[in-house]
Image (cartoon, coloured by chain):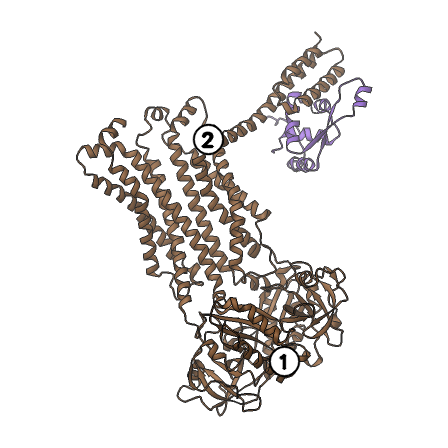
Chain colours: A brown, B purple
Amino acid sequence: MKPLGLALRLVHLLSTLVPRWRRRDWTREWEAELHAHAEEADGNEESVLAQSTGAVTDAIFLRSQAMYWDLWWGDLRFAWKNAVRRPGFTLLVTATLALGIGVNSAVFALLDGVLLRPLPYRDPSRLVFVWQTLPRLNVFEVENSPFDYAAWHEARSLSEVTMISYGSYTLIGGDNPERVRGSRVTASLMPMLGISPAIGRAFTAAEDLDQSSAVAILGEGLWRRRYGADPAILGRSIDVDGSLRTVVGVMPRGAALPGSRADDELWLPMRMSPSERVNEIGHNYTVLARLADGVTLAQASAELEGFAVRMAAERSSHQSLGVRLVPVVEQTVHGIRPALVVAAASVALLLLVATANASTLLLARASNRRHELAVRAALGATAGRLRSLAMAEGLVLASLGALSGLILGSWTLRALLPMFDGSLPRSLSIDVDGRAALFTAALAGAIGIVLGAVAAYRPGRRLADALVSSTRSTASPAAARGRSALVVAQIALAVLLLSAAGLLISSVAKLSRVRPGFDPDRVLTFKVALTGPRYASAPARTGFISDLVDRLAATAGVRAAGVTSLIPFSGMRGANGVEIEGRALTNGLAIVVDQRHVSPGYFQAMRIPLVSGRALTEADDSRTERVTVINRTMAQRYFPNESPLNRRVRTVAGFDSEVWFRIIGVVDDVRHLSLTRDPVPEMYHPIAQTAVPTFTVVMRTTGEPSAMAPSARAVVQDADPNVPIYDVLTMDDRIASSFAQTRATMLLLLATSALAAALAGVAIYGSIWYSVDQRLPEIGIRLALGATRASVFAGILRRAMALALLGVSVGIASSMATGRLLAGMLFDTRATDPPTYGVVVAAVMALTIAASLVPARRAMRVDPMIALRNA
Amino acid sequence: MRVTLITALVLQAIARGHRFGFEIVDVTGYATGTVYPALRRLEHAGFVRSEWERERIASRDARPQRRYYEITAAGTRALDGALEPMRSLGGLRPLTPKPAR
């Protein structure tokens, strides 16, 4: 045979070594190669044969490359089969891991959406809020006046300055009037944020002034809901607060102003009058700006503070006013960050517990498999091969856990989001998405490696030891120590979580017991806005209010009804400067008192007790002397040694300023802002003397208050079908939502700590059961030698208690060390609250006893004969 | 992957337009048993890609179809990186024996 023919035969023979999928190509390639050599050699064909030996190296190279993957693939398949063959064990490990991974992917999605992802604006890290401050009054978030807005334009460190006036508006026309959230914005706002309408146009600079025609841009939700996503909406006229506006655009879905906690449904141009543009007193506008290129926050702050100092010196309206820049990102998340950090820490701890638990299970099984592993090693499996197999097992279990965890995670997130509703900014989108899946995959990988390392851990490496010893020999001390350490770690972590949950439960319980100063039980509240030409005059508004209150009071199921301009727990204060007649201003400054306007029936409806003097009556109206009722705090603080009755006071700014009010009565304090804040001085004016256009109605009902909402709506519709009611909530709900975030964190901690405790309980049970199992012969000997069954029982319990005590002390120590993390969320509870820790310790001890009872009873009932025979 | 002297030279040969296994063997002077495993590793790393020549051309020249290799962008970068130290040494030259004292 010619050398080329021989060489080709060799290549065909070798091709069987090459993995099947590339065999044909490989053969063709070598045929072409050898042909080329044969041509070149031209007569000296022996060299072809020499070159064909390269095919041997090539084929072996490809085979070994494939073998590496084949082996790994084989390990994975073996691990998978192993997992399927022991469904109970696999299910237990998977469920444990899924719990840990699931809550983590949910909280990651939340954290990612809120803290990690940039806000949906152009270069959001350069955006800042400009707040004015009143350091003397500890107020650091005063809104700007239009005068200030104009002044900030002079600042070189700000490249763009815009202004927003948040508000709400009544839409009339169609079947039902509706109150929607909306904002007036300057034309510069949308370009600065890098947002623009999806349909139509943005506002023009001319529309900042009131000479321009009235226009509006709709939010996507409003456009869909109220206008049926009408594609021909542009140019249509809509009735906003009784005046017509032309729709010029529709915003894209999800477009929201920085800091909005609810949907922005209506966007209106600023349209300021010339007199409003120079207003120095009305601090009603939020200013949003962009730092100029290369300017730091500190530099910009310094420049604006310089401005503020100059304005304070030059203008009486700006005395004691400072300025503060807050990055939009900071302002958006600072309220929720502590809760999220606690949530993330708690679920991370739960994951540690879950991983430790799964490791305990794997360790227990590994000692059952000592035989198998020893035989494998004896038959030639290298340490590397055994490790590879263990890794495969770890990864299979972790992947199963991660898959189920991902499903569990999206359920958890769905449960979690409503709890944090109201504290999450609207400009964020939160979902278990690709990034959360990636995070989960990374978690699974890390856990897989940990579990693999645990599974690869082989006590007693010597074949003889493993084969000779029977299954019920005493395990190596190292393995026993490893298992105990894992149990102690789980108990410690559970204690850490339980005490955090305990501290928050104690806080929430104390918050719920704080008396707000009125009786919130069975009170329905809703807001009403009187807008449009019909209610332009004060008598029209006063008439509507007294008519409405009368109609409501006459409704079946209503005990009493009243009206207030600011309902407690609405988040608004309505503070104003106040001067007392005949008393000089301290340092030339007025005292600060919160102002409310109420109907005569308000105190009765809210059950706010009268302390002295008289309450407001129907007779206190626009024809009589201006009167006011003050609260106890104001009376005690400003009239400490005298009766405030018949003294006169006046407000120094805003409408009604320079009018003297006679104090006719004192009512008890109400916690207006939140349960955690002490009452502040307050004044209640008769709404009949100052008819405010928007107010909240309170109705004390005989039955379930929320069931009265339809009747209330009907009564208002009956009085005027064009007046909408909105923000309908029971008083209990308003109070509850004021500490919703604390409660949500508490619930999350409660859930994670309960799961952690359950896992720790299982770990204690497993560990004690296993140690009893190992010690059966020893126990048998003890019993045979005269030990009492009670002493055996007590011995087992003692061992369990020793583990628990160690875990508890580590847990308590770490709780004390990390208590600072929680401190901001606690109310009237110290991070080292002894009763809470007492309860936690007692609970964990009880759990330990419960978990070790069954194994201890088993030890007690050992028959010495059987135990010794099996030894 | 680590670019060794062998793989760098094979890569260099491909970059210079020697695209067929035999040509590479010829120009580098390495045996097929060295060149082919190097080609496998380079292709696995994405430094070269391969394609079969047109069947028409092969049958015109009455020989089996050849597999042609071609350097990728990643391969060019890897080659540059591998050659850099050689350049900084002023190129590779045989060392001349030191003169005896």
Which secondary structure lies at badge 1?
loop
- Sequence-first tag of 1 and 2: 2
Q: Chain of mark 1?
A: A
| Residue B68 sits above or below residue A768 on the image | above
Give A163 or A687, whichever is nearer the viewer.
A687
What number is the disc on residue A599? none
Count of numbered tags: 2
Residue at the (70%, 37%) spot, across then down: B73
Q: Nearer the viewer, residue B67 or A258?
A: A258
* Residue corresponding to mark 1: A280
Above-or-below relation of A719 to A813: below
* Mark 2 lies on residue: A85
Which image quadrant is residue A835 in? Answer: bottom left
Q: Residue at x 55, y 56 (%)?
A: A115
Q: Residues within 10 Å of mark 2 (few under 14, many from 20)?
A: few
| Label 2 SS | helix
